[in-house]
Image (spheres, rainbow, N blue to C red):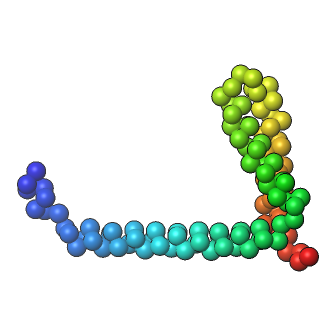
Amino acid sequence: MKNYLENIDRDALRARAEQMLGYANDARSQASRWTDYAVSKAREFSLFDFAIFEACLLTLGLWLGSCFSKLFKKFRGVLFMLFAASWLYLLWRIVFDDEED
């Protein structure tokens, strides 16, 4: 084990760690930009849009719960369709709807 540790190229490890840190910083800045954009678009949401958002979260939770519960197994397809419809509406509202009220 001692011979293995002596043969490690510390400069190469340090360079690789700095490269990975750069990738992590790029990913963090991109996530930050997307979050800022989504929050700015959410400020324009109406009461109806927030109701759709809540329905989206609720149906996602119900759909996931139905995957593990015998009670909701028969409604799994309906719950997934409700989730998908609300998620697509919100995606359209955040990304594609540039209409200013």
Q: Position of residue 41 (x, y in %)?
A: 77, 71
In the current view of this chain or complex, which residue is farthest to the front?
47
Quadrant of res 43:
bottom right
Quadrant of res 97:
bottom right
Q: In this view, does 76 lie above or below 96?
A: above
Quadrant holding the C terminus: bottom right
Q: Where is residue 52 in the image (x, y as percent from the top left)?
A: 84, 53
- Identify the residue at horizontal 55%, vertical 74% (top origin): 29
- Identify the residue at horizontal 66%, vertical 73% (top origin): 36
- Identify the residue at horizontal 27%, vertical 71% (top origin): 14
In the current view of this chain or complex, which residue is farthest to the left?
2
Q: In this view, does 58 lie above or below 34?
A: above
Quadrant of res 18:
bottom left
- Identify the residue at horizontal 73%, vertical 37% (top origin): 63
Q: Which of 50 and 63 is in front in this view?
A: 50
Q: Position of residue 7 (x, y in %)?
A: 13, 62
**In-image side of 77 versus 37 (left or right):** right
**In-image side of 91 versus 69 (left or right):** right
